[in-house]
Amino acid sequence: MDRGIMHMARGSMRESLRGRTVGPGMVAIAVVLLVLFISWQTYVYFGASWHYPTENERFMLAKAEESKGNLRNLNDKDRAKLMKMLGPQAGMAISSMYTSAHPKKPR
């Protein structure tokens, strides 16, 4: 019984669309919308990912500057906070932050 209803629905839809064409205006609108959608997705995924630094990021940047990229140069309290935030990668992260903020000059 369900098959008959679905078959009738599909058949009547085909018949109602038969003979109808899409005008050039609709094609142009569809193309513009597609280009806008692809452009927006490209910007979202590959565009500039600038954002305001969070409190933790500001803290890490400040400690990277203070320690000159070396975790051993920090006091125990700051080192423990960084280790809690970043785990074993804290030293590498601080070093990386410092070197990216202070690139070496080419010789």
Image (tube, helix red, strand yellow):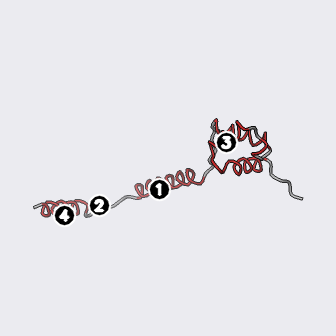
Among the two numbered marks 3 and 4 on one chain, the one whose residue lies closer to the N terminus: 4
- 3 or 1: mark nearer the eye: 3
Q: Mark 3 touching mark 1, by CB under 8 A?
A: no
Q: What residue type is labelled 1?
A: Leu
Which residue bears the numbered disc 4?
11
The quadrant where residue 19 appears: bottom left
Viewed as shown, does residue 50 lie left or right of 102? left
Q: Quadrant of the C terminus?
A: bottom right
Q: Which amino acid does label 2 sit on?
A: Arg
SS at mark 4 in the image:
helix
Q: In which quarter of the image is the N terminus?
A: bottom left
Q: What residue type is labelled 3?
A: Leu
Q: Distance between the residues labelled 2 and 1?
A: 23 Å
Residue under the point 57% across and 51% down: 43
Residue under the point 77% across and 50% down: 99
* Residue 87 screen position, x and y as percent: 63, 47
* Residue 22 screen position, x and y as percent: 35, 59
Q: Which amino acid does label 4 sit on?
A: Gly
Q: Which mark is residue 60?
A: none
Which residue bears the numbered disc 3?
82
Q: Distance between the residues labelled 3 and 2?
A: 66 Å
Which residue bears the numbered disc 1?
34
Q: Residue 20 carries which label?
A: 2
SS at mark 2 in the image:
loop
Among the two numbered marks 3 and 1 on one chain, the one whose residue lies closer to the N terminus: 1
- 4 or 2: mark nearer the eye: 4
SS at mark 3 in the image:
helix
The quadrant where residue 4 appears: bottom left
* Residue 96 screen position, x and y as percent: 73, 51
